[in-house]
Amino acid sequence: MRIAFDLRRIKNPGIGRYMKCLVEAVVAQAPDHEYLLILPAGAEEMVRLPEGRGRKLPSTLKYYSFREQVELPRLLRRHEIELFHSPHFMLPLLRPCPCVITIHDVIYLACPEDLPSYLGRLYYRFMMNAAARRAVRIVTDSRFSKEDIVRFLNVDPSRIQVVYCGVDANFYPVTDPLRLEAVRARYGIERDYILYTGIYKPRKNHSVLLKAFQRFVAAGGNAQLVLAGPVNNKEEGKYEAGLKALASGLGIASQVVFAGFVPEADLPALYSAASLYACPSLYEGFGFTVLEAMACGTPVVCSRAASLPEVAGDAALYADAADPDAFAEALYRGFTDLQLRRNLVEKGRLNRQRFSWEEAARQTLAVYREAVYGPAGKAVAL
């Protein structure tokens, strides 16, 4: 089978990691297929494709453009593609072959405050609806996301397959003291710290974490709070500025580190050196960072919202992320109770084993076969 992957967003930190890890695992498991990787120019080395398994095709096609609608079907026909997988829910209106899409979540429908532009939300809904209707099969990351896709997009649940993501092998407990000290120095961390990584969006709930941390400090917690995340646009810059003002108003500014963008090479050490990973998020389609922290041997305090309990299982200390007092109490317990911390680390190690890219690839390949041949093994009509 000739399979094409649309990897034009592989440079984006979150979805890019998903694309790279899934594609490499699929290629490793199914070497008899031939693959076409559609990549942004300059990103050819970001994903491995062994010689003889297909080709990488640099592309200047922009997402959501008219040219994309015309050129992408031509490209798929030219290369005689038999199955097209879009890991970012974008499909051309004309489909020359069966198509699979990944819808990781419906965040901008569930959390409209994350996309302030009304026209932006309308366009997002239109594109996602159009892709969901045209895809033969839909892959999503969690049962929670499947339920939201059914609820917001009115998709037949039988067309949706939940495939849990894996954890990149680069996330493991870093024990080299020089490497740990180097990452602390790089981000201005001077003592034990609680870590939270994530973009600056309202659903990430940084403000409640700051309020909880202020209560944690007042109760005698002796730590810094490290917030790591990129500022991608003016809206996120305003949000970060508001959080800095809040930290100052709470009297904790000197104990909060705004680390900014952290490259992936630094993340394993940053997780490993943390005393605690805090995730107060109110909406996650999967919750990669919780698993990454567990893979690095860091105990996790976590919100009960959205997919997080599904992913974290029994390996996190849960607290109501809408209640700063409750979350502060969980932070204090997780930081000071050594036996609890040891239990969380061990449970995290076991929980992390539920998620692998090898299993994700196996299940995704089964989706491809059904998309092309149907459950009865007959070719699917477009």
Image (cartoon, rainbow, N blue to C red):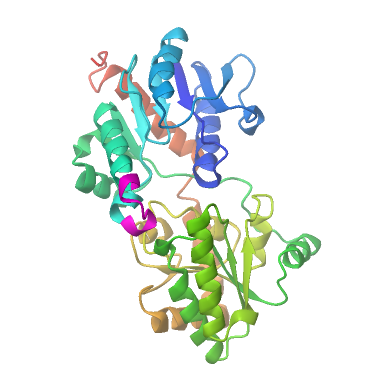
Q: Is residue 75 magenta?
A: no
* Image coords of residue 277 (percent x, y): 54, 67
Residue 115 colored in magenta in the image: yes
| Above or below 132: residue 61 | above
Locate the C terminus and report the quarter of the image it occupies: top left
Q: Is residue 198 visible?
A: no
Quadrant location of residue 120? top left
Q: Residue at x 39, y 81 (%)?
A: 326
Residue 42 lies left or right of residue 159; in this view the side is right
Q: How many labels sit on residues?
A: 0
Q: Nearer the viewer, residue 298 or 267?
A: 267
Residue 44 position within the rendered picture, expressed as x and y whole percent measured from the top left: 63, 27
Furthest-bottom residue in this view: 219
* Span of residues in magenta: 112-120
Give the residue drawn at x 66%, y 51%.
Answer: 263
Q: Is residue 13 above or below residue 245?
A: above
For the N terminus, the quadrant is top left
Residue 274 in which image quadrant:
bottom right
Q: Report the magenta stretch's main SS.
A: helix
Q: Position of residue 316 (x, y in %)?
A: 45, 67
Q: Residue at the spot x=51%, y=46% of the render?
A: 14
Give the vertical position of 56 relative to 367 (above or below): above
* Residue 362 position within the rendered picture, expressed as x and y whole percent measured from the top left: 43, 32
Relative side of 358 to 101, left or right = right
**Residue 145 visible within the image:** yes
* Residue situated in front as seen by the camera: 63 or 369: 63
Which residue is rendered at x = 37% and y = 53% of the image? 115
